[in-house]
Image: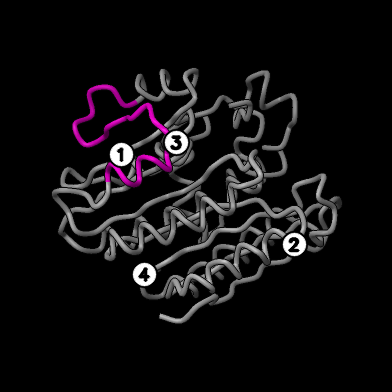
């Protein structure tokens, strides 16, 4: 309960996560039938980049600040969403931004200080429901959705606990077995390779099909004391996602490269076959 995303909002990891999230949501919106999104760790919903927390770390200056006002076709949808929504949007705000009347967002947040502003932000919206509950528990309580067959489950825990990778692997397996038409997306930090290899191997051992991993590395993942990069794993990705993810991440790498991060590495791999 100690993690506060306000210190990290709008950093390189948020840019990667939210640009790829919008790509998945756009793919779902290509069909007229409705879909649902379950956001297991929704956070505040929006973040003030001029606030004390964000300015204390200044991480957003090497993230979203380097993208706004730039003409970057591969990131145009992400850029316009940030500008339209104000402050810096969290994942539930990005999702609500693209929802149609037939779609629905279920946003879960356990932190008592975060769920209140999350409720205020979405109050009165008929196709958004906010749940004050543990996100992992919500998977079993809210899936499969009652009224739609398609959707997306976004799993984005703070990774403060030693078993978070294990719980993520279990969650992916559960969703794929109980919501087969659903896409699953998991964001995760990359500090050093050992836990990442173990995570990937556990998914392979569980024989979960159709897994794609995207990695965005600021530096080689050798120092476990710092965030060297991040990953975004997608199960049951829509057609064409690999190619689109490559375009998005290459554009991010080009525009987020700085003197301090001169060689951003982008990796996209099919972990298991369909």
Residue 103 image offset from top left, x and y in percent: 21, 47
Q: Residues within 10 Å of mark 3 (few under 14, many from 20)?
A: many
Q: In this view, does 5 lie to the left or right of 97?
A: right
Does the magenta portion include 136?
A: yes
Q: What element carries label 2?
A: helix
Whether 114 is drawn above or below 272: the answer is above
Q: In this view, does 57 lie to the left or right of 131?
A: right
Residue nearest the observer in this picture, 86 or 213: 213
To which residue does mark 2 refer? 194
Quadrant (top left/top right/bottom left/bottom right) for the N terminus? top right
Upstream in sequence: badge 4 or badge 2: 2
Occupied quadrant, residue 32: bottom left
Residue nearest the observer in this picture, 249 or 186: 186
Upstream in sequence: badge 3 or badge 1: 3
Q: Residue at x 15, y 58 (%)?
A: 33
Q: Which residue is drawn at 32% across and 48% down?
A: 37
Residue 165 image offset from top left, x and y in percent: 59, 53
Whether 274 is drawn above or below 51: the answer is below
To which residue does mark 3 refer? 42
Report the Cα–Cα distance between label 3 and label 4: 23 Å
Report the Cα–Cα distance between label 4 and label 2: 29 Å
To which residue does mark 4 refer? 238
Quadrant (top left/top right/bottom left/bottom right) for the C terminus? bottom left
Upstream in sequence: badge 3 or badge 4: 3
Residue 106 circle label: 1
Residue 12 image offset from top left, x and y in percent: 66, 48
Marks 3/2 in contact by CB < 8 Å: the verdict is: no
Residue 90 image offset from top left, x and y in percent: 48, 37
Marks 1/2 in contact by CB < 8 Å: the verdict is: no
| The magenta segment | 122-142
């Amino acid at each position: 309960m100690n993690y506060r995303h306000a210190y990290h909002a709008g950093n390189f990891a948020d840019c990667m996560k939210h640009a790829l999230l919008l790509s998945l949501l756009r793919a779902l919106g290509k069909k007229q039938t409705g879909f649902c999104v379950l956001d297991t760790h929704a956070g505040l919903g929006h973040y003030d980049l001029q606030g004390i927390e964000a300015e204390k770390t200044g991480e957003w200056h090497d993230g979203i600040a380097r993208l706004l006002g730039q003409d970057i076709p591969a990131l145009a949808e992400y850029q316009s969403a940030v500008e339209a929504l104000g402050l810096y949007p969290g994942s539930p705000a990005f999702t609500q931004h693209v929802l149609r009347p037939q779609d629905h967002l279920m946003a879960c947040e356990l932190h008592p200080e975060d769920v209140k502003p999350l409720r205020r932000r979405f109050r009165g919206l008929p196709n958004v429901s906010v749940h004050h509950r543990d996100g992992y528990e919500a998977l079993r309580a809210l899936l499969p959705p009652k009224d739609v067959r398609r959707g997306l489950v976004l799993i984005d825990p703070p990774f403060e606990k030693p078993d978070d990778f294990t719980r993520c692997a279990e969650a992916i397996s559960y969703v794929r077995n109980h919501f087969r038409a659903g896409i699953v997306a998991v964001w995760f930090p990359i500090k050093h390779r050992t836990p990442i290899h173990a995570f990937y191997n556990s998914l392979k051992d569980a024989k979960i099909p159709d897994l794609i991993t995207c990695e965005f590395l600021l530096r080689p993942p050798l120092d476990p004391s710092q965030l060297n990069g991040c990953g975004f794993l997608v199960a049951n990705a829509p057609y064409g996602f690999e190619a689109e993810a490559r375009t998005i991440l290459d554009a991010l790498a080009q525009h987020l490269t700085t003197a301090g991060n001169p060689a951003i590495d982008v990796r996209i791999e099919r972990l298991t076959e369909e």
